[in-house]
Amino acid sequence: MIKLAPSILAADFWALGEQIRTIEEAGVPYLHIDVMDGSYVPSISFGSPLITSIRKNSKLVFDVHLMVEEPIRMIKEFKEAGADIITVQAEACTHLHRTISYIKELGLKAGVSLNPSTSLSVLDYIMDDLDMVLIMSVNPGYGGQAFIPSTLQKIRDLKEKALKAGVSFDIEVDGGITRDNVDEVLKAGANVIVSGTAVFRGDIVDNVNKYKQAFDRIKKEIEDIHGK
Ligand code: DX5
Ligand code: ZN
């Protein structure tokens, strides 16, 4: 199933609660929450207190993307705050397998994110344990950047790799996605679409509906390429 995961990094923080309610009422399944520590990536976004606060008022699946050094130190904190899925940057973990195992041990879904220059081979011996792989289509750190075109081949390669290994996980893509390139991203094999600017800039409901229409339009074509 194709899922939209709006990234609150692009929301208006003054109206954050209202905007989250708007996307929830528009029928979006996931909320993508970008945590940045100012060290792994240059900027700082927000931390677990924000998640605790929105968790009280939202039933969305909280898809927490940790762009932090050694995220293993903070996984329990983010679980307690209300995360459902925790995705870590492979490059930020000294012990990636241990980090994933810990996320799963705590009863959460585990994702691994790869920067544009990181090879898929880092997944070779951990694929069985993953619920999601996040392919970064920009260098992490900021919203509103342009989609890096070589990502499309990387998504195709990942899809093929999973098929060959007989494993299945969600393929999420993050950065620079708009309604103009989302078809290509889905056709390449992604099924979870992160979108910040293209959801929160302008009319949110209209933006979400247009994504949903694009998903419906492309569904049949995708089934022909990748099966149901
Ligand atoms: C980038 C973040 C993204 C970002 C996406 O470091 O991980 O989730 O918010 O924003 P857009 O859709 O504006 O590129
Ligand atoms: Zn993200």
Image (cartoon, rainbow, N blue to C red):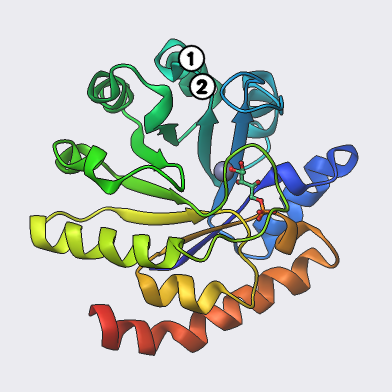
Residue 179: mark: none
Give SS at disc 1: helix
Residue under the point 76% across and 68% down: 205
- Mark 2 vs mark 1: in front: 1
Q: Quadrant of the C terminus?
A: bottom left
Residue under the point 61% across and 28% down: 41
In the image, residue 15 sits, relative to residue 227, either above or below, namely above
Residue 66 in sight from this viewpoint: yes
Within 8 Å: ligand 2 and the Cβ of disc 2?
Answer: no
> In the rendering, at what x and y percent does residue 39 appear?
61, 18
- Alpha-carbon distance for marks 2 and 1? 6 Å
Residue 78: mark: 2
Foreground: 70 or 206? 70
Badge 2: residue crowd in 10 Å (few <14, some 14–19, many ≥20): many
> For mark 1, what is the residue?
74
Foreground: 100 or 40? 40
Badge 1: residue crowd in 10 Å (few <14, some 14–19, many ≥20): some
Q: Are marks 2 and 1 in contact (CB under 8 Å)?
A: yes
Within 8 Å: ligand 2 and the Cβ of disc 1?
Answer: no
- The image quarter containing residue 198 is bottom right
> In the rendering, at what x and y percent does residue 136 appear?
49, 49
On the picture, is 221 further left or further right than 3?
A: left
- The image quarter containing residue 194 is bottom right
